[in-house]
Image (cartoon, helix red, strand yellow):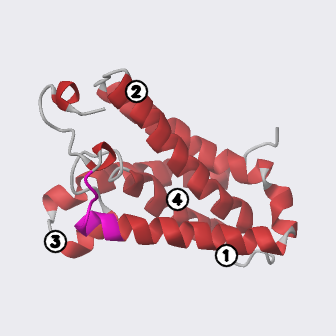
Amino acid sequence: MPKLSRGLLAAFVVTTLVGACLHFLYTLLPNPVTALLAPVNESLWEHLKILVWPYLAAMLLLTRNGPPGCRTPWLLTVPVLSAAMLGIGWLYHMTLGGEALAVDIGLYVVLMAAGFLLPEVLDGASEHPLLGTLSVLAVLALAAAMILFTFLPPDHPLFLDLSGVNTWSTIPY
């Protein structure tokens, strides 16, 4: 495993803290702009925002002035992280009925850490131009879905506000 640089570690810490702060942004400043950046409720889907937006910002900063294709591994990581967050969140909350905040925070930190490690593993992908194009399209589709579903969430348990007391016992399967 490659040695992590101090800069990458600092970026991970700052990105993780920014995402944690985003969690509360809409509550402090409820308006359409903050709704695009921060979760508007406690649904699994809305929590992608605290992972994806700070991660993409960190990627842009860390890869600026980099060689062509250097962003491809980072962009490929975004849908992987998002799928993992939704899948593990669904398993923990919907299937197992878990409600521990510590588990949610731990999952967030582990996934963010994975986001800073996976691009090194996927580094060979930067040589394939098709993967670069597909990764950009995948991230754009995810971003568009996050924006659309902020204002028009589908009628699906993934989009339910799970902040209520004993919410889990009322979710239809």
- Is 163 displayed left or right of 83 in the figure? left
Residue at point 80%, 78% (across, down): 68
Label 1, label 2: how far apart the Cα atoms are: 37 Å
Frontmost residue, 12 versus 121: 121
In the picture, the quarter occupied by the N terminus is top right
Label 3, label 2: how far apart the Cα atoms are: 30 Å
Magenta residues (range): 148-155
Residue at point 36%, 51% (across, down): 45
In the picture, the quarter occupied by the C terminus is top left
Mark linked to residue 31: 3
Expressed as whole percent of the image width and height from the top left, the position of residue 118 reads: 70, 48
Q: Quadrant of residue 138?
A: bottom right
The reply to whether the C-beta atoms of the residues labelled 1 and 3 are less than 8 Å apart is: no
In primary-sequence order, the first of circles 4 and 2 is 4
Q: Which residue is mark 2?
A: 92
The kind of secondary structure element at disc 2 is: helix
